[in-house]
Each structure stands twice: as structure tokens, then as C-alpha cells.
Image (cartoon, rainbow, N blue to C red):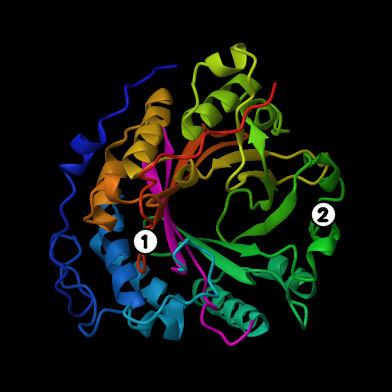
Amino acid sequence: MRRVDPVEPMSVDAGFARRPLSVGPLDTRPSGRVSSCALPRHAETLGGHTARQLLRLCETAGLSGPDSAAYARTLLTLLGPMGERPLDLPAPDDSFVADDHTPVEFSLAFTSDAAPTLRVVLEPGCGAPDLASNGRTGLEAVRDMARRWGIDTGRLDQLEDLFFPPDPRGPLALWCALEMVPGGVPRVKVYLNPAASGQERSAETVREALRRLGHRQAFAALPEGDRHLFFALDLGDWNEPRAKVYLAHHDMSAEEAANLSRVDGGPGPAEIASFFRTMAGHDPDGAESAAGRDPRLDLRPVQSCHSFTETATGRPSGFTLYIPVRDYARHDGEALDRALAVLGRYGMDPTPLLRSLSAVTARRLRDGVGLVAYVGLAHQEGRPTRVTTYISSEAYEVRPPAIRGVPSPRSRP
């Protein structure tokens, strides 16, 4: 694999300059590029802030002006009344999409053979008076999209009683992800809460959801985890719609992460461990392990995702490992260096990532940590390896850098 030297944070910061944020009616110019006058002018709102970020990101991802404008409108529609909320009010503390409670998060999915794909995760029910109302609002928003674009929600309908009980629990009810492709109609995913009926029933909920979707043997194929985080579904125009199970892994080492995948032909243990060490700031060549130490991530947990497409064998067809890089880096310059190293290792062009960070914020990378939130290494059978970087909106708050350094990973003999 090709290796690249990480860039110095100062050299990256030098290119970060925000374009003017003048706003006006949504429109495009004959060139097909989005006008800098993109949204209704009024006091700065959550919707205005995140939609302008999205417009810039769409341009970075190579989407046309009309497509970009359509996706900005979709974001505003899904945010509903929360989109009109002035940013000078406190953050909506019922949303956990991002650390600062912004109910929006962006991501770029890279492969070596194509331009990166832009995605956005958001919480349509954010700001609802309770979790049950949050879920109902989210379901209504997804079904409105489905009616508009002819998307089949049958698989989601099959699971409604499991994930939307009368008295739901947990930190979320429904998140929605839009994968932005040319044409202005996104691919849609929904993220549901396995602990909706209580954390103690989350495994049972996941097992039953998989069974109802025809994946009767799938639950037994999952590795051990500390907590079921999400149950996700692809809706609409996907070649092979997936059901996905996300697990949290607390206090994990590279060696343990290397054995989480159950996908044939995917990244091997050494490749997964190398990704883990790079993103965690450990020695990517494994010198620490060779010295007899076992570095562990004991702050925010590592996540794994296991996706299922076929129902005959119960075997996963996809695997992703997510490292919460923001908790193991001093500042975003370090986090970006690690992401660039992984992109270079897989022969992926880092330019869109650099441009995307500039499109989202004007601050220097070393002045905060959390802009680059997660980095994921993914493999889906029959497709090239994918690296996904998750980018925070930071609409409400920039997390200060760890001036005195990140706590060293615990080691055990």
C-alpha cells in the first residue's frame, strides 16, 4: 500500500478562508453553479447556517447548481420549525447527532475509483416536546419524502412497533441520512434506536427486526459488543438495500478490532489494525504491540457496523469500523493528518476533504477538535474499499483543543 507523509497543520490552515455569506432566494446561475445568494435573508438560523454549508459541500462534491439547491431545500424541509430557530438561542439539548447538539452532520465517502459521495445525517424530530413526538415527526418526514419520490417504506413499516413504542426510551427515535447523487433525489437511510423499549431489550429488538426482514440467522453472525447503538435501513433506490446493525466497543485495542469483521474477502485483520492505530494516533506499524503493550481506546467507544443484504446464509455482506478520532487527537490538524494518511494509503484523492473542511468553517484547525468527528473504513462485498470522514457543522460550539495533550491510551501487559 502507498503511504503518504501527514501534512503540517499550519500548512493546511493556510488555505482556510470562508467565502462571503450573502443570502437571498434559492436560485442558480446559467453556469449551473449555485449562487452565493442562496437562502432567505433574516437573522442567522440553524437552517440557514447548515443549508449554506451544504451548498458549499455540494459544490465541492461536483453536484450541479440545481441539484445543490434541491438538496438545500430538502434539508430545510426535514429540519422543519427547528430550521427557523435562531442560532443565538441555546442548542437543542435533545439532539445527539453531534457533540454540540447540532441536529446535522455531514460526511464524505471516498473510493479510489470515483469522486467522493456527499451525505448528511439529520434528526427531523429535533425540538419535539418528547421522544414519542420526535419519532412521530421523523416518521412523517420520511414518509413525506417517500411519497414525493416514490420510495417504498415497506421495510420500515414492518418495524414500526419495535422502534416506536408508546413510551420510548433512549437518546434518539429516528435519524435520517441522505446520500446526495446527481438528479436531486437522494438515496435515503434511516437510523433507529434498538433501546427504544429499554437497553435491556435492545438485543431482543435487533434480533426480531432482522427476523422480520428475512435475516433469520443474521443475529448469530454479529460479533460481541457492549451496546447496540443503531439499527439502520436503506430505503428506495439502492442496488442491494441493506439492514445494518451498529455496535459500540468500549476499551478496545487494535488487536481486538481486527477480529470484528465477519465479511468474506474484506479487509484482513492486519489492515483493520493498521487503520485503527493510524486513526487513534498509535504507531501504525505496530511497534507498540511488538513491544508487548496493548494500546486501548477507553474514552468514546469504537463503533462497528455489520450490514446484511442476502437472507440465505445469515452472513454479513458489509463491515465498517469507525474511530471517533476527535477524542484521541489534540486538535483537528492532527485528526486531519490521520485521515489524509489513510486516504493516501488507499490511493484516494484528499483534495475534496480539504475543500470540504474549508467549506464548513473558517477557523484554524488547531483552534478546536471535533470538526473531523469520525473516520470509517468500510468494505461491502463486490465494491471497492471505502473511507468515510464525518464532518461536524459546529453550528453552536467549537470544542476547545486538548491544549495539554490527549490522555495516553491505557496499556496492559
Q: In screen coordinates, is 41 left or right of 76?
A: left
In the image, residue 124 lies in the stretch drawn in magenta: yes
**Location of mark 2 (residue):** 214
Q: In screen coordinates, is 190 left or right of 20?
A: right
Res 270 quadrant in image: top right
Which residue is situated farthest in the top direction here? 290
* Nearer to the camera, 146 or 216: 216
Question: Image quadrant for the N terminus?
Answer: top left
Sequence-wise, the earlier of marks 1 and 2 is 2
* Nearer to the camera, 371 or 2: 371
Which stretch is magenta? 102-130
Frontmost of labels 1 and 2 is: 1
Secondary structure beneath disc 2? Answer: loop
Res 342 quadrant in image: top left
Residue at (77%, 78%) from the top-left corner?
165
Which residue is situated farthest in the front direction here? 404
**Location of mark 1 (residue):** 393
In the image, residue 108 lies in the stretch drawn in magenta: yes
Q: Residue 382 in the image: x percent, y percent?
A: 59, 33
Res 379 quadrant in image: top right
Question: Image quadrant for the C terminus?
Answer: top right
Q: Which mark is residue 224?
A: none
At label 2, which amino acid type do we have?
Answer: Gly
Determine the CA span between mark 1 and mark 2: 37 Å
Q: Is residue 295 above or below residue 99?
A: above
* Nearer to the camera, 69 or 147: 69
Q: Residue 209 in the image: x percent, y percent?
A: 80, 60
Residue at (32%, 33%) from the top-left corner?
349
* Nearer to the camera, 204 or 251: 251
Residue 196 in sight in this render: yes
Disc 1 crowd, CA 10 A, few/some/many (<14, 14-19, 20+) = many
